[in-house]
Amino acid sequence: MVASFVVGLWYTGEEVITLHRSHIDPDLLEPIRTMFHVDYVFEGLRDRILEFQSSLDSDSEIALWLASFGTQIVMRVERITYRDPAFICFSGLVDGRKSELIQHMNQLSFLVTVVPKENQEQPARRIGFRGPDDA
């Protein structure tokens, strides 16, 4: 016996037809991504920051000005990740201290800026991006 389950209803204008999984092309069952999914927001953020980083010289690093804490904070971001269902995580240094900012994707608001690299003996830091399944 083949199991079937209802995936939706379709109104033809004259009648309502119950759609079972067996009626639908399997390729259409893939999740639909929209701008409201955290992975979509993450990819847009990643692409925009990588584009900005590509314009930096070897003596400059990228930093974020965060202004939603009653004061202005500069974070030297080392890594950006995301967690379902809706969180973007920024890891890096604030005043030399290891820090992590976890924000809901609807609250993202920061200024991407350029700062001189901290350690002249080492290459300039660049932001790494990791999805939830990356090791």
Image (spheres, rainbow, N blue to C red):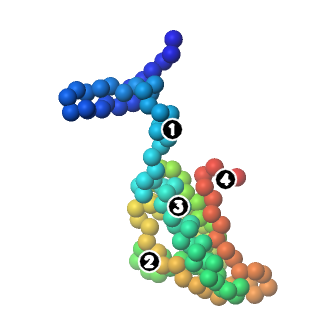
Q: Is residue 69 visible?
A: no
Q: Residue 5: name its quadrant.
A: top left
Q: Earlier in the sequence, mark 1 or mark 3?
A: 1
Q: Is residue 63 visible?
A: yes
Label 2 sits on residue: 67
Q: Earlier in the sequence, mark 4 or mark 3?
A: 3
Percent across and percent down for residue 44 are 51, 64
- Say which residue appears at 25% left-offset and 32% top-offset: 12
Q: Are marks 4 and 1 in contact (CB under 8 Å)?
A: no
- Say which residue appears at 59% left-offset and 64% top-offset: 80
Identify which amino acid the numbered label 1 is placed on.
Answer: Asp
Q: Earlier in the sequence, mark 4 or mark 2?
A: 2
Label 1 sits on residue: 27
Identify which amino acid the numbered label 4 is placed on.
Answer: Asp
Image position of 60 (left or right of 121): left
Residue 13 or 5: which is nearer the viewer? 13
Percent across and percent down for residue 61 are 64, 81
Label 3 sits on residue: 42
Mark in the foreground, 4 or 1: 1
